Amino acid sequence: MSRIYFFLFIIAIIACIFLTLGYIPARASLLYGPPARLLSISDRIEYSARLLSHGDALITPLDSNGVERSFRIEQGESVASVTSRLEESSIISRADFLYDYFVYTGLDTTLQAGEYALSPALSMIDIASELQDSTPEEIPFVILSGWRMEEIAASLPTSGLDISPEAFITAAQTPPQVLAFASPATMEGFFLPDSYLLPRTTTVDQLLETIARNFTLHITDEMRSGFSAQGLNVNQAVILASIVERESIQNEEMPLITSVFLNRLNIGMTLGSDPTVQFALGYDSIGQTWWTNPLSLDDLKIDSPYNTYIYAGLPPKPISNPSLDALKAVAFPQTSPYYYFQAKCDNSGYHTFTVTFEEHLANGCP
């Protein structure tokens, strides 16, 4: 009889070993995927058993009607801290359950710091997957001072927005209604340089509307009065500011450069601005730039309404997108007797200003 009990005992042990080494890991692998390669055999068995003991908790959302909320993982934060905070934030039901899943799958080693939008309507397994990609829901879209429309368009493919350069250029030919007060022909000149925080799902029309509203918010009544004091409407002020932007390297000189152009406009003298010619020339395929430099004598002869060496007055439209500093310089220019300016010869980015053409020539670099 004792032999029978002994054999039954041995069979029970074998069954337990089979269950432990075979069925439990196999069942866990079937339900939750293969275990992390770096787990030891004993750890695989332990975490497989833990996951199976959690039942359906890992695939059952805490609240199927839950709404998204912001959740941030700090650089270097432990998995235990993350799962604990998820439970405290009422995004998951049990921190220890999710912790076990992270360790079993090896996802604990690929957890990424960043900002996430998580919902208790997601299962813990789905949340673990979400936390592997810290791609933000909102992205910054930057417009640099002095860019022309095509340069903004060229930045779109790497911006994170699903807007093609072609769609952007086409849509920008029709300014949003919010800019009606300025009566622009296109959006050129009204893309206020700034950093715009936008949802990744932003459409081209939403992008233009956002930028147009930003421009409108920054053009104060005081600035409009300043434009009027110079004999300019808003559209004309933007055109002049777009030239001042391209002519200036040091922002502090913008009000003085503006005074030179206003002095010239007031006596019917041509503006004689190189950037307007660069705009007229368009893209330089050799230099791979929209701003050809240096300009040749033949370049200065191009027959275009944007060539301010040939045609007096302002060009038909803005030649770039001016900064707020350039717009303020046009609204509140410095008073001066100057009609000429040219870059100093010391590569400082500053200019010399003169009253007469003879003085202007005398200041030329050797």
Image (cartoon, rainbow, N blue to C red):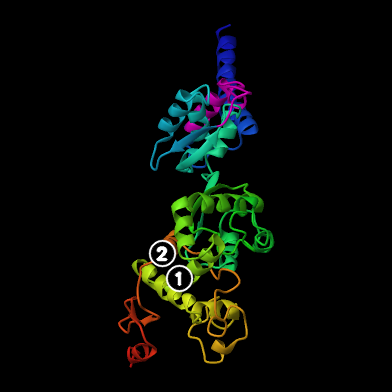
Query: Is residue 23 positioned above or below 183 on the image?
Result: above
Q: What is the quadrant of residue 174 in the picture?
A: bottom right
Q: Answer yes or no: is residue 125 visible.
A: yes
The percent position of residue 55, horizontal first and vertical second, equals 60, 20
Q: Residues within 10 Å of mark 2 (few under 14, many from 20)?
A: many
Q: Nearer the viewer, residue 40 or 222?
A: 222
Q: Residue at x 42, y 31 (%)?
A: 80
Classify 11 as above or below 208.
Answer: above
- Work out which quarter of the rendered image holds the C terminus and state it: bottom left
Q: Is residue 297 above or below residue 333?
A: below
- Residue occupying the far top of the picture: 1
Q: Amino acid at mark 2?
A: Ala
Front one among 55 and 314: 314
The residue sitting at 40% across, 80% down in the picture is 339
Can residue 140 be seen here? The reply is no
SS assignment at label 1: helix
- Magenta segment, which residues? 43-68
Quadrant for the N terminus, please.
Answer: top right
Q: Which residue is mark 2?
A: 329
Q: Is residue 222 left or right of residue 128?
A: left
Specify the label residue 35 is tagged with.
Answer: none
Instruction: Name which residue type carries label 1.
Output: Val
Write down the residue under mark 1: 244
* CB under 8 Å between discs 2 and 1: yes
Image: 8 above or below 334:
above
| Residue at x 33%, y 91% (from the top left corner) | 362
Tag count = 2
CA separation in Å, label 2 and label 1: 8 Å
Q: Which of marks 1 and 2 precedes in the sequence?
A: 1
